[in-house]
Image (cartoon, rainbow, N blue to C red):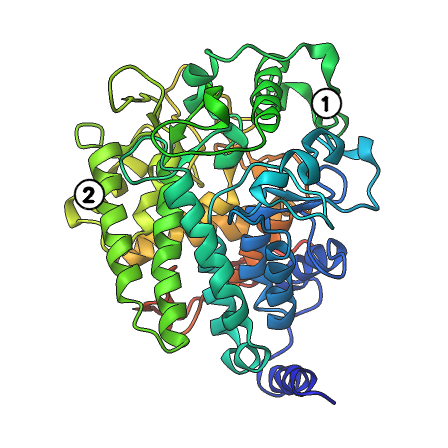
Amino acid sequence: MDRTAQLTARRAERDIAYDPPPAAGSLHVRAARVLEASWTGTSTVPSRGLYPHQWSWDSAFIAIGLRHLSPLRAQTELETLLDAQWGDGRIPHIVFNPSVPLDAYFPSPDFWRSSTAGRAAGAPRTVQTSGIVQPPVHALAAWLVHCADPGLSRARGFLTRVYPRLAAWHRYLLHRRDLGGGGLASVVHPWEQGMDNSPCWDAPLSRVTPAPARSFRRADLDHGAAEDRPTDLDYGRYVRLATDYRSAGYRDGPGGRYGAGTGGFAVEDPAFNALLIASEHALARIARELGATGTARHARAERLTAALIERMWDPAEGMFFCRDVRGEGPAGELIPERSVSGLIPLLLPTLPRDITAALVRTAHGPHFGLGDTTRLAPSYDLLGEAFDPHRYWRGPAWFNTAWLLERGLRTHGERRRADALRESALELADASDFAEYVDPYTGEACGATGFGWTAALTLDLLHSTGTAVPDVTGTAIPEVTVTAVSEVKGGNRG
C-alpha cells in the first residue's frame, strides 16, 4: 500500500473510532449523498441536469465541504480544475466534460473554441474550456482543504503543486485584469463575477448590442422556468460579449484595454476583489507552510484592501458598490445598485472597525432584512426597483453568499448574528432539498435541487463546531460548540 493510501485508510479508521456515525437520513448523510451523486471520478458537477460540467468557483466551494468527507477527494477536485489552467494564468470558469452532448449546455465547447481562439493566451490543447473566469476562491479553498488533513496534504505534495498555479492565477488577475488602473481586478463579462443576472450589470450592459436570438439556443430553459431565468435580451448581450472576447483571442491588457479595445463591459466588483484579497491572505499562509515568510502576500492583501475601500466604499450608504470602469469620468463611476456583493467584503479580517460595523447594520437593515424580514440575505436590494424574489440573482438568496457572510460576521466577533445565520442556512438547506437558491422571504426552493455547493457548504457549517473555528483566512476564532440544527429541531426529512 502506498503512503497516500495508508494515510487515507488511517484517516478513515480515526473517523470510525472517534466520531459518532451520523444518523441515517440526517442532514449530513443527505448532503454527502448529493456530492456523491454529482462526483464524476475527478470532479463534482454543480447539477447533473442544469450544469453538467465542472465550474470554477463551484468546485472551490465544493472542495471546502468535501474536505469533511474526503480530504483526498477535495484535493483532487481542485487539482482537476487547475489542470485546465491557461498559460497566461487564468482559471477558466467551465471545464467541459467531453462525454456530455454539446446540446446539453450552452455556451458549449464549440462556442468557446478555447484550443484555437485561446491559443495565444495559452489555452490547453487536451481539454476544452470556456475563455472567461470566475471569482478567485481557489487559494482559500486550497488552504482549508490542506488544514483538514495536513499529513495527507504534505505526503501528496498538494500545496507544493498547487501554490505556483494559484500564484500565476493571482498574477493574471492583478496584472492583466487591472483595467481601471486602480490596482483591482475587473470582470469583462457578468458571468465572471458569478452573480450573472444582477441588476448591477443593467447599466453597463445597456451599451452592448445583443446577439440575434436566432444565433443561439438557450439550454437553461429546458431545466428552469423562464420567469426565474435571465431574459432573452440579457442573454443576447451575454452572448455578444463572449463572442467579441473570443473573436479577439481572449486578449487582456492593462489601462482599460482588452480584446483589441472592443470590449464594452469592464466592472470592478467588491465580492470578486474581496475573495481575491481573502485568497491572497490564504496564499500567504500556504507560502509560510512551504517555508517562505508570506510577508509580501499579506502586504499585497493590505494594499488591495485599501484600494477596495478607496474605489468602492460609500460611507453614506454603508456598503460597497461596483465601479463601472467604462463609465463617465477618468476613474469610471460607481453603480448605484445595492447587491449582496457589496456586503461580502465583511469576510476580510483587517477591514476597519467602522466599516465592518456599517456593513453589519446594512445587512440587517431594511435593504437586506437579514434576521428580520429575510432569513438569508437576498442577492439584491429588497427595496430596489429591479427586485424579484425568484429571478436569478435579482433577489433570491444563495447559500454561498450566506456562507461568506456567516464567516464574515464570525470573523468580526458578531457571534450571535453568525449563529442565527448558520441556523437559518442549515434549516433552509434541509427544507429546500439543497436548492440552488431560495425565495429570501419564504425559503421556497428555486432553480435546481440537490445543488453541489449548497450541499457542500451545509457540511462545512455542520462541522464548524468546537473550541476554535478558523475564519476564511485560517485565523482561529473562539467559538462555542453548536449542535447541528437539523438534529435539535427535528428538521430531518429522511
In the image shown, does 225 or 355 lie closer to the viewer?
355
Q: Name the residue: 24% across, 33% down.
A: 311
Identity of the amino acid at label 2? Ile
Give the labeled residue for mark 1.
Answer: 218
Identity of the amino acid at label 1? Arg
Q: Earlier in the sequence, mark 1 or mark 2?
A: 1
Horizontal placement of 151 versus 378: left or right? right
**Which percent across, then down, holds residue 133?**
53, 40
**In which quadrant of the rendered image does the N terminus lie?**
bottom right
CB atoms of marks 1 and 2 within 8 Å: no
Instruction: Decide: few, some or many residues near mark 2? Use Cα within 10 Å; few <14, some 14-19, many ≥20.
Output: some
Horizontal placement of 176 versus 131: left or right? left
In the image shown, does 13 or 201 lie closer to the viewer?
201
**Disc number at residue 355?**
2
Q: Is residue 189 visible?
A: yes
Q: Name the residue: 50% across, 26% down.
A: 259
**Which percent across, then down, holds residue 2?**
70, 87
Q: Secondary structure at mark 2?
A: helix
198 over 272 or under it: above or below: above
